[in-house]
Amino acid sequence: MNIWDFVRTKLKNSKQLVLMVVIDHSGSSPGRKGFKMAVAEDGELSGSIGGGVMEYRLVEQARKLFDAPQKPFIKRQDHHAEDTEDSSGLICSGSQVVAFYLLNETSLPLAEKLAEAENGHLDYNETGIHFCETPLQQEHKTKIQEHNWTYAEQHGYRNFLYLFGAGHVSVAVSRLFRQLGFYITVFDNRHEELTTFKNNDFAHARQIIDYKQAAGYVPEGDHVYVAIMTFAHKNDSIVLEQLLNKKIKYLGMMGSDDKVVSVFAYLESKGISKQSLEKVDAPIGLSIHSQTPDEIAVSIAAKVIQVKNG
């Protein structure tokens, strides 16, 4: 359950909540811009703004709002060991700014919309939280002045994973990347009755395609990731050749060392340069001696996270 589903459920049950949002951070702050935590009137919590004693103190402050409501406000939390009012008590250097919003039944329409929306952006300021259906050109945007602030963030799916091949590894990868918040699309060229294709409920979209048309199904962008894991060398070559010139964040191909050498040699024989092939993560994922589909999925996820955050 994401945090907006949690908020919607509590509001439907006539429970107030306090939503805390990290709208800015610096240094080694454990809470990063965009981290959220909801504190419900019945004691339940959802999300995190960094954890530890710092989070505990802010949760306690949030709970006081149920008895003494306030308009939206922000609090700066400095991270050092000194025992001061604005110190978290943590020894890491840095700081974070947290916005507090008391939500009640008047917030239910917003929560309903956000729980269902797949894209758009949220604006947070001293007047409240506002949703706009147009996406941001960047993931976050912050402006903090003495008596007012604005923080905008992309809402919905920020990262998109395209999987070519619908076998057992594809299912494991879909399951893990769904937990990581990616929008997942799976392609295969085999009959749609293929069990691992038909039963992959973790993917948001599934489609039987002609691999010779693969390029047309993958958009360009800095939030686009592709993993090739078809059932045959020939199919891998067909898909990879089309995607080499795509401007995407990540392109990986699953296979043994021998398979990778074979596919690359074939593409070089067709005039593809070694320089073009060097950008392909193959064999795919971090080298952690993965054996099972779930282990392979972990290695792929680790590499993609490394690329995404690097």
Image (cartoon, rainbow, N blue to C red):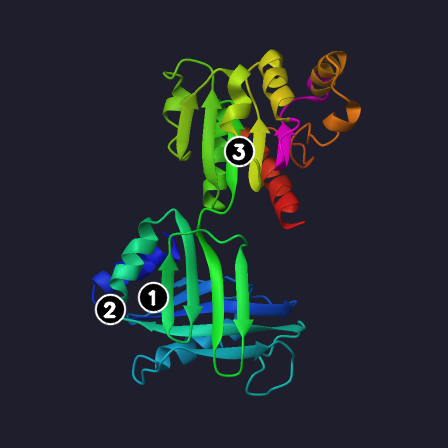
Q: Earlier in the sequence, mark 1 or mark 3?
A: 1
Residue at 39 percent of width and 20 percent of height: 195
Q: Quadrant of residue 266?
A: top right
> Label 2 belongs to which residue?
106
Q: Classify mark 2: helix, strand or loop.
A: helix
**Image coordinates for residue 76, horizontal then vertical, percent:** 54, 78
The residue closer to the viewer here, 1 or 228, is 228
293 in magenta: no
In the rendered structure, which amino acid carries the disc numbered 2? Thr
Q: Disc 1 versus disc 3: distance between alpha carbons?
A: 40 Å
Q: CA distance from mark 2 to mark 3?
A: 39 Å
Q: Which mark is residue 44?
A: 1
Q: Which residue is mark 3?
A: 219
Q: Nearer the viewer, mark 2 or mark 3?
A: 3
Q: Nearer the viewer, mark 1 or mark 2?
A: 2
The magenta segment is 244-259
Mark 2 or mark 3, earlier in chain: 2
Q: Which mark is residue 84?
A: none
